[in-house]
Amino acid sequence: MTTTDTPTLARLGRLMVDNPLIPLTLILLALVAALAILNPAILSMFWVGNTLKIAIPLAMLAACQTLTMLTGGIDLSVGTAATIAAYVTATATPLIGAPGAIGIAMACALAIGVVNGIGIAFARVHPLIMTLGTGLIATGCLLVYQRSVISTGTIYPDVLVWLGTGRTWGLPNGLFLFIPFAALILWAQRRTGFGRLLYAIGSNETAARLSGVRVWQVHLALYSLSGVIAGLSGLLYLGMVKTASLSLALPLDLPSVAAAVIGGTSIFGGRGGYGGTILGALILTVLATMLTLLQMPEGGRRILYGAIILAVTALYIRLTDRS
Amino acid sequence: MMRLLQLNAWTAGLAALLVLLLLATKLIQPDFGGSGLDSLARSALPFALATVGMAVVVIAGGIDLSVAAMMAVASVTAAVLMDGASDGQAVFAVIAVLLVGLAMGTLNGALIVVTRVPDIVVTLAMLFVWQGVALLILNAPGGGAAPWLRALAVGGVTIPGLPPALTDWLPRGVVFLAVVVALVWLPVRRSKLGLMLYAIGSDPQAAFRSGVPVGLVRVAAYALCGLFAALGGLTVTMATGIGEPIPGPYLLASVAAVVLGGVVLGGGRGTILGPILAVFILRIVRLDLTLLSVDPNVAAIVEGLIMVAVVMFGAVLATRGRKA
């Protein structure tokens, strides 16, 4: 087990692979410290609340990536699903009231997930290409829908606004949705059969199949669930920003992948978990604050996100190869 | 021999389908003629070049998700360099853009070979990086294009000495595409490199044991893809006269056209002609939908559905092939 060159580095690497929460927490603290040096006035209870508020929709979308990445997949339609859920809710509420609108919105998000699931489970299309394609089709559907409801105006349901912008004891109300959600995902990934099936398929799909796992059922359920989670985060995001635009949650697509990758979930499946992803989302949010302070343009941010994904994945490959 | 026949049968089938679709277009729109063909060729040009680039990489057993983003980089680079430049300077701008494309593709390939991260992940990450680079170069659509460059792809062909009526129906876009592909791809295909591209696509291990430098050939495949992406980006700027920093819908379209064109996802089989024919088929379907006065957004949905269906069909075929 001992390596000949730099055993401490190898041990540190193994520690990071086995237990990504420790280095991630350190990175988060270091970033906050750097932020404090850059602008000491920024650190306050209000800032903490604000950071949490911004990180919650990102962390929820990153849950879709974490779960799909555990099986070796990815879901690039989450931004579109979230946007559609938000837009439908905002425009259908004046017509049929908030509960009906939210119901329809979630049904749309579920439909996207089901289509993804069908393509991936039965036709065995690579998840990346399948979800990209559904995202494209769904965007087209949204444009058609937008033309038919252009005159209705928008109303944001009070529940969502309360969840998105309200605060209780200085902390955002979004936590009322997020904490049970995160607890459920964390419990499901470790303690339920479904969670273990995800890890099993991600580690070795053939072995899982030979052990009697019906892989297509898991894929179908997984991508449907991913659609639902994306819809839910879209609703929360709508309450937070209170504008129904056609590209509402699309900018979150890429950071959601980055958050899961930073959080230690392997993009090849079988390794990782949601705990790291939450920290990853927080790290990205703090990093975004810092980049705004440094006045980094949008292009620079995208380059940085891409570089982070590539560097972290390459690092994990190196570390796991050695052990 | 049998397989060669089969592949040619697929391409011939595509060509027949293309002719049928052209006839259908003529039925829908009786005065469809030279100008219609011209606009069709112009709109298909970026798609065709992206597809050729994608096809080269897929034949070599990879995939390049960053092709649309590289086109955006090339488009804005061309527009910025040519903005206000004279005709002579524009020539250098074109050369610079092609070099940038080669460099981008080489970087993609080198990262895949050096980091040993799977191509799909690397090019996904690079997709974001190139998007960012394009935005850094040009924040909003703008810049300019040299007029002679626009003339290369717009309008009908005129050959001195022949009556214009004889050659006018042939769009310059098609000629441009044919010349570019003939200049770049045919020499590669005929050389050792072409054989090695097919070799690493069909079985990298066997290729390695036969002495093929697998890593270098893979880098070359991505470099070629980058070059074609740069040409594609150049045609975007050519067609519109401005640079477009937001990548167009070329990624999924190119994958769909590659699959429809008979190149197997997984590598080693297929031609370049098939995917090019497939691009024109997909564009004519789009054109027909427009001529039938279908809402453009609905047409986009139909187009997306066709592409996803084609990719799903291709994936089913690939799975069958693996099992057999």
Image (spheres, rainbow, N blue to C red):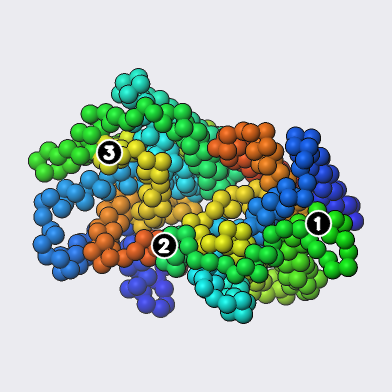
In which quadrant is the C terminus of chain B drawn? top right
* Residue A230 drawn at (x, y percent): 39, 38
Q: Give the residue pinned by disc 2.
A: B139
Q: Few, some or many C-alpha atoms within 10 Å of disc 3 (few <14, some 14-19, many ≥20)? A: some
Task: Using residue A166 as the reference point, say whether residue A219 is left or right of it.
Answer: right
* Residue B158 drawn at (x, y percent): 80, 63
Q: Give the residue pinned by disc 1.
A: B168
Q: CA distance from mark 2 to mark 1?
A: 39 Å
Looking at the image, is mark 2 or mark 1 earlier in the sequence? 2
| Label 1 chain ID | B
Instruction: Give the amino acid at mark 2.
Output: Asn
* Picture residue at 58% right of the left edge, 34% below the top: B295
Disc 2 secondary structure class = loop
Disc 3 with disc 2 on a shared chain: no
Disc 2 with disc 1 on a shared chain: yes
Q: CA distance from mark 3 to mark 1?
A: 55 Å
Q: In this rendering, which labeled residue sits more in front, label 2 or label 1?
A: 1
| Label 2 chain ID | B
Q: Is residue B207 visible?
A: yes
Q: CA distance from mark 3 to mark 2?
A: 26 Å
Disc 3 with disc 1 on a shared chain: no
Q: Few, some or many C-alpha atoms within 10 Å of disc 2 (few <14, some 14-19, many ≥20)? A: some
Q: Quadrant of residue B112?
A: bottom right
Instruction: Give the amino acid at mark 3.
Output: Lys
* Picture residue at 41% right of the left edge, 53% below the top: A254
- Work out whether residue B30 or residue A95 is closer to the camera in this orientation and state it: B30
| Label 3 chain ID | A
- Work out whether residue B152 or residue A88 is closer to the camera in this orientation and state it: B152
Q: Few, some or many C-alpha atoms within 10 Å of disc 1 (few <14, some 14-19, many ≥20)? A: some
Q: Give the residue pinned by disc 3.
A: A242
Disc 3 secondary structure class = loop
Task: Using residue A262 as the reference point, say whether residue A108 is left or right of it.
Answer: right
